[in-house]
Image: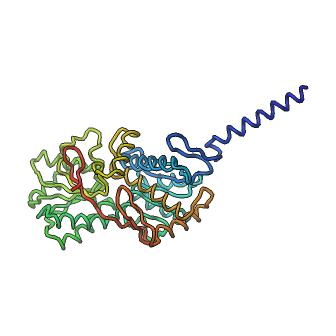
Amino acid sequence: MKKKMFSLLMAVALVVGVLAGCGSNSNGSASTASSDGSSTGKNAVKIGGIGPISGSNAVYGLATRNGAQIAVNEINKKGGLQFQLNFQDDEGDPEKGVNAYHKLKDWGAQILYGCTTSDSCAAVASETYADRCFQLTPSASSATVTEGKNNVFQLCFTDPGQGAAAARYIGKNRLGKKVAVIYNNSDPYSTGIYNAFASEAGKQSFKIVSTTTFPGDSTTDFSVQLNDAKKAGADLIFMPIYYTPASLILAQAKSMGYQPSFFGCDGMDGILSMEGFDASLAEGLMLMTPFSASASDSATKNFVSAYRKSYKETPNQFAADGYDCIYALYNACKKADVTANTSTPDVCKKLIKTFTSADFAFSGLTGSNMTWSAKGNVSKNPVAVRIENGKYVTM
């Protein structure tokens, strides 16, 4: 009797253990989709993400991660193909980006989403190229990111593309006659945009009357640059820089009574959400960006509503880029028949073929009918917005 009772208890314990294991994420067991759309386990395609979610560039990494997670949740609620997103912090540092990639590789990532910043993305791209891991970045815009690497694709404009587009937009719309440029000469993003802008400016109706630089985002005094622009009579200042130095330039221009128009690029998106920033300083600021949260189409409205509900703030362009990245991967994976059982090199081979095929196009929040070249560059139309009453308004 004791032996029979012991056997029965062991059988019950075994069944309970098996059932418990089916719901576990730690051992890579069966996939489940919860009420919020998150998915874990062996039936989900593993997507690794990298970006700064701490440090001075956290606003970008947090936005891309949050936008991507909303897309993952929506996709998993559909049923069928499931995604699992594992996002690692690199603080915007290339070395930490490579370390984060190796963590994701050990986890079993089949696709890399990211990196968020160009320097980190370029460093990680060398690793993914060697490993034949497909990589799609939402916001790393430097041309060096994809150069010589057929597995790395960009959803954002390249730096040269942004610079040339900004010059054409300013010229076509006659936004200024005398233009000053202030850029960061230590940053590939900033210098890449400036070089293309300066090249295209010679074909436009305006003249560059002042070009000044600064050595890094830790710079706090821009009086020399602003005085040079003012002395040259610049009525518009083009700033292909990030929002932190831009916020200081706007404040210092006001304090010295200098009121030109200001025009920036996508790196300036996020300035309104800076802690302690006086939004009135950005009134009238124009910038190139593929997304405006104030757009009236249903897709944007639904995304903005979901983002505000989840994160209690209005999404910026980087959040929209992250959202679009995941959906572009979803569409491509479905077309290429990628599953959770497809090896990382095979996923890479399938997605390269799909993204560069003539019959693959993707429409999302940041553009319609996006297509990709064999070099990994995206083709889509730029959009310019102006800040009015603390909101982005499409120009």
Toward the top, the furthest residue is 1
Task: Give the camera-side residue of 27 and 130.
Answer: 27
Q: Is residue 339 above or below residue 84?
A: below
Quadrant in which the N terminus is drawn: top right
Left or right: 30 in relation to 285: right
Task: Give the camera-side residue of 13 and 296.
Answer: 296
Where does residue 305 sit, x and y in percent of width and height?
36, 43
Where does residue 102 sit, x and y in percent of width and height?
55, 54
In the image, what residue occupies the spot 16% across and 64% down? 173
Quadrant in which the C terminus is drawn: bottom left
Please tell me how many numbered marks the rendered image carries. 0
Q: Quadrant of residue 262?
A: bottom left
Task: Give the camera-side residue of 112 and 39.
Answer: 39
Q: Is residue 181 visible?
A: yes
Q: Is residue 114 visible?
A: no
Asked which colour scheme the image uses, the reply is rainbow
In the image, what residue occupies the spot 11% across and 51% down? 259
In the image, what residue occupies the spot 16% across and 61% down? 180
Where does residue 265 sit, x and y in percent of width and height?
27, 57
Left or right: 8 in relation to 161: right
Where does residue 21 sit, x and y in percent of width and height?
68, 40
Task: Give the camera-side residue of 156 and 16.
Answer: 16
In the image, what residue occupies the spot 16% across and 47% down? 252
Q: Is residue 268 above or below residue 10?
A: below
Left or right: 307 in relation to 170: right
